[in-house]
Image (tube, rainbow, N blue to C red):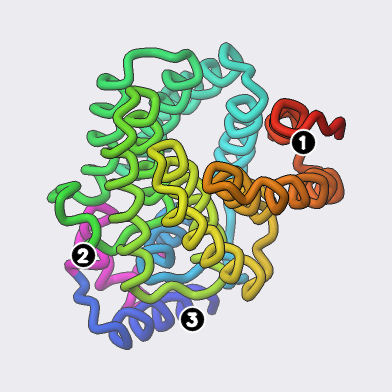
Amino acid sequence: MPEMRIGDLIKGLRENQNISQAELAEGITERGYLSKIENNKAAPHRFMLDELFNRLGYNPSFITHYFIDAHTAKIQTMKQTLNAHLLKGRLQEAEDVIAALEADEKFMQEKLSQQYILRNKASLASKKKEDADKIIATLLEAIKISVPAFDMEQLGKKYLLTHTDIDIINLIAVQYHNKEDLDKAVEIMYALKNNMDMRFMDAAAKGAIYPRVIYNLTKYLGMTGRYHEAIKLCDEGKEFCLEIGAYGLLPLIIFNKATCLYEVGEKDQCRDMLSPIYYTMVMFEEYSDLDIIKNYALDKFSIVL
């Protein structure tokens, strides 16, 4: 049975990394329920499995034997719709989906569902440019659902973070950027990078989120005038993306490098990089940030892209 394989796999991955049941379960489920999963006496829903595999450092997409019931399929569709609304700036529609999810009693029974709602309420508030301190408070409330003892000061050296946790921390850094406290944003992103560097994550799991961490960190470093530091990290991020084939954010990481090169006097090198960056993004159909690059090229070099 697929559940047998999943339970055995979770137990094997956990024991191979010397992670206790309490550490893996914390904030996601009860240790006793995790024991039942590992002993093939319980069949958890997909969302819980995703977070367990995230915490173990694996992309859950490598597990192919999920059974998805009708309710789970409906929730998946609603989540995808919500993501699309937020991405496209359809804020009222996003708010309506969040309300519909909150009204689903079965969905809201799970702690991770409550975390999902808080995270997306914070994202919506950020899109509406609401108070950054209130958004940070909401995000901290969200992460403490899965990491109850979370302390930002300990971020760089502990915590088995899921993709949701990492996303929440990244959003906290964004709010400090919005508050113009760039030093705090840099501090958070460095700690998050260090956390990801020191723990096991497979290529797919790390590739899904690490480039975003590098992109935001190098952007904040550039904004604080730490150009050489940013350039070095952009090169590190470029090598990572090329090694594992994660190309989505690669042009923007290279763009961060180009802008820093301009600031340290390497203007010709910066100019020569802009057209390849722009047309690579066109090729990958990454249109959302094209105007930033186009306007930069026009402003700095009178280049029309």
Foreground pick, 112 / 92? 92
Regarding mark 2 in the picture, which secondary structure is present there? loop
For residue 288, say whether it is visible.
no
What whole-number distance in Å separates the C-alpha atoms at marks 3 and 1? 41 Å
Query: Given the current orientation, which residue lies at the most extreme front position?
Result: 265
**x, y percent for residue 161:** 32, 58
Regarding mark 1 in the picture, which secondary structure is present there? loop
What whole-number distance in Å separates the C-alpha atoms at marks 2 and 3? 32 Å
The amino acid type, in three-letter code, at marker 2 is Lys
How many other residues sit within 10 Å of disc 2, few (<14), some (14-19) or many (≥20)? some
Query: Which residue is at a point 34% across and 25% down the rendered structure image?
Result: 180
- Numbered disc in front, either 3 or 1: 1
Q: Earlier in the sequence, mark 2 or mark 3?
A: 3
Q: Read off the magenta span.
A: 22-43
What whole-number distance in Å separates the C-alpha atoms at marks 2 and 1? 36 Å
**x, y percent for residue 129:** 44, 14
Could you say which disc has been placed on residue 5 in the image? 3
**Left or right of 109 on screen, residue 18:** left
Foreground pick, 141 / 217? 217
How many other residues sit within 10 Å of disc 1, few (<14), some (14-19) or many (≥20)? few
The amino acid type, in three-letter code, at marker 1 is Tyr
- In the rendered view, tell whether residue 138 sits above or below residue 140: above
Query: Which residue is at a point 43% across and 72% down the rendered structure image?
Result: 201
Could you say which disc has been placed on residue 157 in the image? 2
Q: Earlier in the sequence, mark 2 or mark 1?
A: 2
